[in-house]
Image (tube, rainbow, N blue to C red):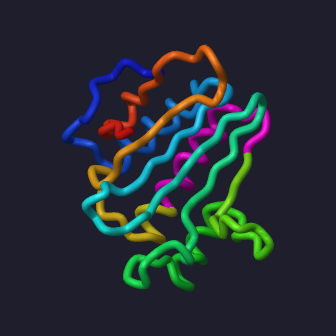
Amino acid sequence: MNDKNPHDAGNTWEKFTTGLAEELVDLPDGSVVVIRETADSGHNRFVQFVREEERTYAELVGDSYLDPAVRAGEEGARLIRAAGWRDPDADDSSRNWQFELVLATTAEYRALAGMAVTGLRDALRLPSPSALTYQIWNEKPGVGSLDLYALGLRRTE
């Protein structure tokens, strides 16, 4: 993971997008990352990533999990689709927006980071990345502690 200073008070959406792309490129196999609003917000807007061997799977929270005041609605759904997210599957219990990368390039990870920001900032109207925290863990045995310093966010457990 990147060794930049954590909790950068000057974090902007541009810096967050760049940092997220850097961190996604370097995620080890078995990693799970959840980036969500701080608990005191009372909302549950989030994006999550799972790295499995040659695949990275991403989800953006769907409206069914959100209070009406922060739902994407029709206009937000249009922005999310235009960014490249796949509609929530009617048969899938998660009901989240989905995206998958296989054998991805650095440019594709940059695009995925941009998709995440479009969803959070534009469609779900999160005002700033400073309203976010992250969790990370690894499902594989023997993997040590992981940190995502380039995000400029506080890590929560």
> Residue placed at 47% from the left, 74% from the top?
66
Q: Position of residue 105 (x, y in %)?
A: 70, 32
Determine the image quadrant of residue 10. top left
Determine the image quadrant of residue 62. bottom right
Q: Position of residue 130 (x, y in %)?
A: 27, 50
Q: How many marks?
A: 0
Is 157 rendered above or below residue 77? above
Q: Is residue 135 left or right of residue 85?
A: left
Q: Is 68 contained in the magenta span?
A: no
Q: Position of residue 52 (x, y in %)?
A: 73, 34
Q: Position of residue 6 (x, y in %)?
A: 28, 29
> Residue placed at 44% from the left, 70% from the top?
124
Q: Is 114 contained in the magenta span?
A: yes
Q: Is residue 1 left or right of residue 95?
A: left
Front in this rendered view, residue 128 or 36: 36
Q: Name the chief secondary structure element in magenta.
A: helix
Is 137 rendered above or below residue 114? above
Q: Is residue 77 left or right of residue 15?
A: right
> Residue placed at 73% from the left, 48% from the top?
100
Front in this rendered view, residue 115 or 68: 68
Q: Is residue 11 left or right of residue 151?
A: left
Magenta residues (range): 101-118
Q: The C terminus is located in which quarter?
A: top left
